[in-house]
Image (cartoon, grey):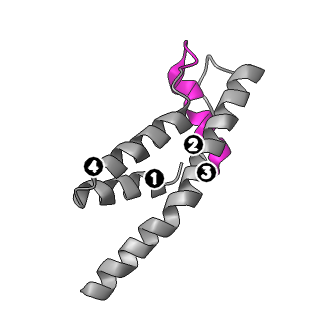
Amino acid sequence: MGPWPVLHLRNLVRAGKDQEALQVISEIMAAAGGERPGGNEGATAKLPIEFAGYVNPGPARTPIIEFSDTTIERAKKKAEGWKALCAKYRPLVEAERNRVKAAS
């Protein structure tokens, strides 16, 4: 759903900034919602990816034809949380990339 939170986490781990890395992990877990909808997780896992707008993961496979309103809302909430993390961490990742590029 966008690489920025994970890339920032990678940068923190490489730099040995463990406490900051743990904070990012907490934010990622919170954005994921922590709950699973049950049943056919594979089919519902595509919804937040679609709603985040990063890629089109394609349609759900049968037997899932329609998703409940609760499932749709949960997926939208996860997507919004991830998009917020991407907006927060993309500038930090790009700044680090530029810093490394300038140092080489």
Say left or right for 14 vs 97.
left
Look at the image and tell me in which quarter the C terminus lies.
Answer: bottom left
Q: CA distance from mark 4 to mark 1?
A: 15 Å
The residue to which callout 2 is attached is: 57
Residue 8 x %, y %: 39, 58
Mark 3 / mark 2, whichever is N-terminal: 2
Three-letter amino acid code at disc 3? Lys
Q: Residues within 10 Å of mark 1 (few under 14, many from 20)?
A: many
Say left or right for 91 vs 64.
left
Q: CA distance from mark 2 to mark 4?
A: 33 Å
Q: Is residue 15 above or below residue 35?
A: below
> On the image, which quarter does residue 15 sit in?
bottom left
Give the mark toward the camera: 3 or 2.
3
Q: Residues within 10 Å of mark 2 (few under 14, many from 20)?
A: few
* Residue at image point 35% right, 80% down: 99
Residue 34 x %, y %: 51, 26
Three-letter amino acid code at disc 1? Pro
Mark 2 / mark 1, whichever is N-terminal: 1
Three-letter amino acid code at disc 4? Asp
Residues drawn in magenta? 36-54
The residue to which callout 1 is attached is: 5
Which numbered marker is on residue 83?
Answer: 3
Whether tag 2 and tag 1 are in contact, CB under 8 A, the answer is: no
Give the mark toward the camera: 4 or 1.
4
Taking depth in this image into account, of 76 and 81 the one nearest to the observer is: 81
Q: CA distance from mark 3 to mark 2?
A: 16 Å
